[in-house]
Image (cartoon, rainbow, N blue to C red):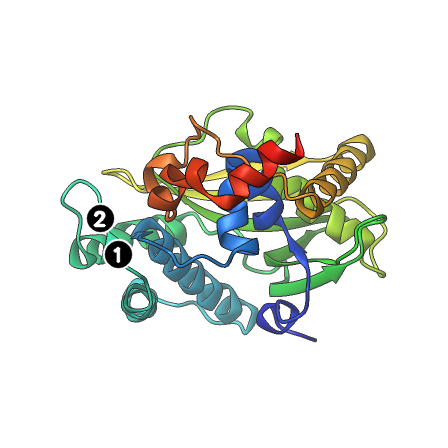
Amino acid sequence: MATLLELREEPHWSYSALNTYLNMCSLKFAFQYVYKAESERTAASLPFGRAFHIAATHHAQSVMQGKRMTLPELHDVFAQWFKLECAACTNLTFKNGESINSLTEQARFMLDALLARWIDWNNIVSVAHAFKVQVPGLGKPLVGEYDMVIKDGETTSIVDWKTSAARWSEGKAGRDFQATAFSFAYLLEEDHGMIPLFRFDVVTKTKNPSLENHYTQRTKDDLYRFQLLALAVERAVKQEVFLPAETSFCCGDCQFASACKEWHRSSAAKHICMAA
């Protein structure tokens, strides 16, 4: 089975790309996926989240093999990968006096919360499962990776690990675009033919970290809406419709902030005006 990195070598769509265009900023999408612009900076939350995912993946894989990782073992995995991820970042930036050392220590308490409330001991089907599916009408396949797939009796669930600065609000999981995209992908895979349950395992980056399980499930109508949105994004991208979202929530940490400020002076902006 191909890995996610291998699947990304060919032209494709991803949840992240679609979500960036629809829910963050279409100009940010263009800088990242079309213009391939150099990143100006990287928020430390990005390598932190990646390292946390890797640590959780290691633990899940160990559980599948009948083993349980200890907190020191799990924290060592995080610390090693966090340093590697940070070293690979461009102009790494921190918030509120944070540092690599302080975030590494914070991860210890978060991983402790993950282990303390881990509920999947005998029901894991797969971990880091890459997928590639063809959404009807899209010119490129949708690729991605399920963090974990579990089965409890007749119920199959996709599990996704998240780190969050605060607890999720009620209803957030029900609106999340990733749950829709991944549920559609699972339905389209040859051997499934059913819409799974989706569970977000959210570990908070608070003073006293907690793990919360947020369940949600999509309907066929939700998936049809996703399909139309994906087709609309693809059509807009082909027409080079890329505009700045002037009040987007992601502006503060955007890795293309300077380029965005100069956008209205660019040839791309003039092209849009001339076309109008």
**Amino acid type, mark 1:** Leu
Give the image location of residue 74, x and y in percent: 34, 65
Element on which disc 1 rests:
strand
**Res. 211 in view:** no
Q: Which residue is mark 2?
A: 94
Disc 2 packing (10 Å; few <14; some 14–19; many ≥20):
some
The picture places residue 158, in percent across and down from the top left corner, at 64, 50
Percent position of residue 33, x then y: 55, 55
Amino acid type of the residue that numbered disc 2 sits on in the rendered structure? Phe
Task: State how many labels appear.
Answer: 2
Residue 240 horizontal side relative to residue 47, left or right: right
Q: Residue at x 54, y 46 (%)?
A: 29
Q: Quadrant of the C terminus?
A: top right
Kindly check if marks 1 and 2 are in contact, taking CB atoms under 8 A apart as contact: yes
- Camera-side residue: 121 or 181? 181
Identify the element where label 2 is drawn: loop
Mark 1: give few (<14), some (14-19) or many (20+) Cα within 10 Å: some
Front-most of 227 and 162?
Answer: 227
Q: CA distance from mark 1 to mark 2?
A: 7 Å
227 to the left or right of 103: right
User: Residue 126 is drawn in which quadrant?
Assistant: bottom right
Question: Hey, which residue is sitting farthest left in the picture?
Answer: 97
Which residue is drawn at the image coordinates 66% and 35% (left, top)?
275
Tell me where residue 230 appears, x and y as whole percent: 72, 42
Residue at x 68%, y 45% (from the top left corner): 181
Q: As displayed, is residue 242 above or below residue 90?
A: above
Task: Look at 32% across and 53% down and name the residue there.
Answer: 40
- Where residue 79 sits, quadrant-wise, is bottom left
| Residue 167, picture quadrant | top left
Q: Quadrant of the N terminus?
A: bottom right
Give the residue at mark 1. Answer: 92
